[in-house]
Amino acid sequence: MIRRYWGDRVRTKNWVAFLFTLWLGAALVGCGQLSATQMAKQLQSVQSGMNSYKSTAFMTVHIQDGVQRYYVETWYQAPNLYRIALGNENKDISQIIVHNAQGIYLISPGVKRVIRFQGDWAERQGHLYLYHSLLSKILAVAEPQYSVKDKVVSFTVPTDPLNPLISSQKVELEQGSYAPKQIILYDKEKQPVITMTYLTFQKGVTFDAGAFSPDQATTLKAIEMPVSTVEQGFGVIEPTFVPANDSLEDESELNGTVYVRYAGPEPFTIVESRPQPGGLDLGAGQLLTLYGVPAVLIGSGGVHQMYWLHRGVEFQLTSDMKVSDMIQVAASTMGDYGK
């Protein structure tokens, strides 16, 4: 009887302590009083307990005095499978990023174009689309600073030093659950350049077999270029940013492919064409984002090449200029329809 009595008392004490811990945590969260260290532990707990998720969002991009809006749908399966579909405001998909054991694929399902490369984009730069990478970005700061307002927790996170388009980033998570609400990327004038506003976020999702297969992605019904548009071409698309002392050397066209060459201290060539069905294997590469549009960068040390697709045109930029300058040149083509 005595042993049973003391056992009951111990269990009661443990239960009371557990309830008190829950109450204290809720009180601290409600009052916004968690320390930076406590907040980091909360986020680490959320991250470590996450096996899969699915999210949808709208991404608004302010570029060259205009606004472009994209639909973004993300699938993730631990430890490293993901699929990101990008489309227009009507949710018509134009590009898909897929990662599986064979590599990263940049897919244009409308023309069945597949660009494959190897890289660690999710860990380095994928936080704009991938929630688990976003948490890693916050936790990369030893003691993440945050503020709480209207049940929203806001963080300022580090920027990518290679990307000159972005100078600061703000992340907003739902208080308590830490589900994503909004990501805002600012330029050096502190003006919002990209705003990712989440529509839905669901954890514990079960995906069908083949969900992260590039073959399945190419069969997706997507935006297709009308035949008349393909036949009439797209003109010449020139960058609005050019490195100092560089100037246009010549423009030429051969069999529907446009070549734009610049001469100077940092010479470069842009090749523009309609994407053709089939695959292209680039080997080791790095995925970048140009105002929300994915681009693949290959090469190291000397000459680099950058590939991206925008408004039905595939671009290839070749140069030995700094990567930051290449990003600015490529991004400055985004607002031009050709002449």
Image (cartoon, rainbow, N blue to C red):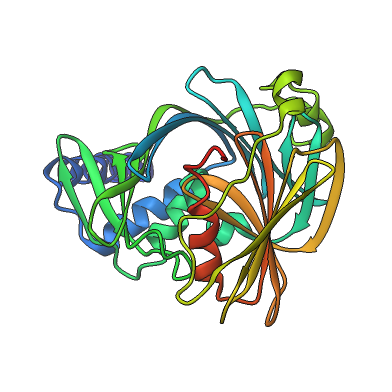
Up the image or down, 74 lies above or below 219; here it is: below
Q: Where is residue 202 drawn, in percent x and y?
A: 49, 28
Tell whether 321 sits left or right of 212: left
Q: Which residue lies furthest to the left in this view?
A: 31
Q: Where is residue 146 drawn, in percent x and y?
A: 22, 55
Report the front residue among 276 and 265: 265
Report the front residue among 157 and 300: 300
Q: In which quarter of the image is the C terminus?
A: top right
Q: Where is residue 317 drawn, in percent x and y?
A: 66, 60
Report the front residue among 312 and 249: 249
Q: Give the residue drawn at x 69%, y 81%.
A: 302
Q: Give the residue drawn at x 28%, y 42%.
A: 9
| Residue 126 makes an appearance in the image | no
Up the image or down, 67 lies above or below 160; here it is: above
Q: Give the residue drawn at x 57%, y 78%.
A: 264
Report the front residue among 216 and 240: 240
| Residue 99 makes an appearance in the image | yes
Q: Where is residue 312 drawn, in percent x and y?
A: 66, 34
Up the image or down, 206 lies above or below 241; here it is: above
Q: For residue 197, what is the image quadrant?
A: top left
Picture mark count: 0
Q: Give the residue drawn at x 51%, y 69%.
A: 325
Q: In which quarter of the image is the N terminus?
A: top left
Q: Residue furthest right?
A: 278
